[in-house]
Image: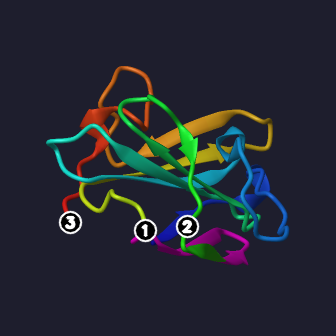
Amino acid sequence: MRYVLDADLTRLRIPDSRPSRHVDGLWKHTCFEMFVRKSSDTTAYCELNASPSTEWALYTFDGYHENMTPADPAHLPQIRVTREPNRLEVEIRADLRGLPQMGEMALAAVIEDDNGTLSYWALKHAASKPDFHHPGSFVLKP
């Protein structure tokens, strides 16, 4: 996956680079997210969060917000970040083959501005308030 953010980066809080490792709560700051489920016939899905810091988190769920469990990928995600004054590119290479989910996807981003306010971006907001886990958000087909 590759996420590209075209914006005045001086007006955003972009985490500094850190050693790549699993970190919970990345969604509290600027991060990019992917949700994948097996098919529309199942409620089980996984969530991958990737921060511009190169920290990441991977979880599995049995259903909508149900039984969140940290997952250990067969290979750690590789995150490459390119920063320019008005552009942030985050490329994530993740091997999810060890997980049961490989179908419909939802892509999203959390962006923190220079005042600490979060905005929530998604291909589709399926509920009245942003909820990346909502089943209606899984709009990309394999």
For marks 1 and 3, give the one nearer the viewer: 1
- Label 3 sits on residue: 142
In this rendering, the answer to whether 22 lies above or below 122 is below
Q: Where the C terminus falls, by quadrant?
A: bottom left
Which amino acid lies under the numbered mark 1 shown in the image of this protein? Gly
- Which picture quadrant has residue 8? bottom right
Residue 136 magenta-highlighted: no
How packed is label 2: few (under 14 Cα within 10 Å), some, or many (20 or more)?
some
Q: How far apart are the alpha carbons under marks 1 and 3?
A: 17 Å
Q: Which residues are magenta?
A: 80-97
In this rendering, the answer to whether 126 lies above or below 89 is above
**Image point (59%, 71%), residue name:** 90
> Which residue is more in the foreground, 17 or 71?
71
In this rendering, the answer to whether 18 lies above or below 36 is below
In this rendering, the answer to whether 65 lies above or below 110 is above
Q: Secondary structure at mark 3?
A: loop
> Which residue is more in the foreground, 84 or 32?
32
Question: Can you give x and y, in whole percent of width and height, for residue 16 in the image?
Answer: 84, 63
- Label 1 sits on residue: 98
Q: Is residue 139 left or right of residue 108?
A: left
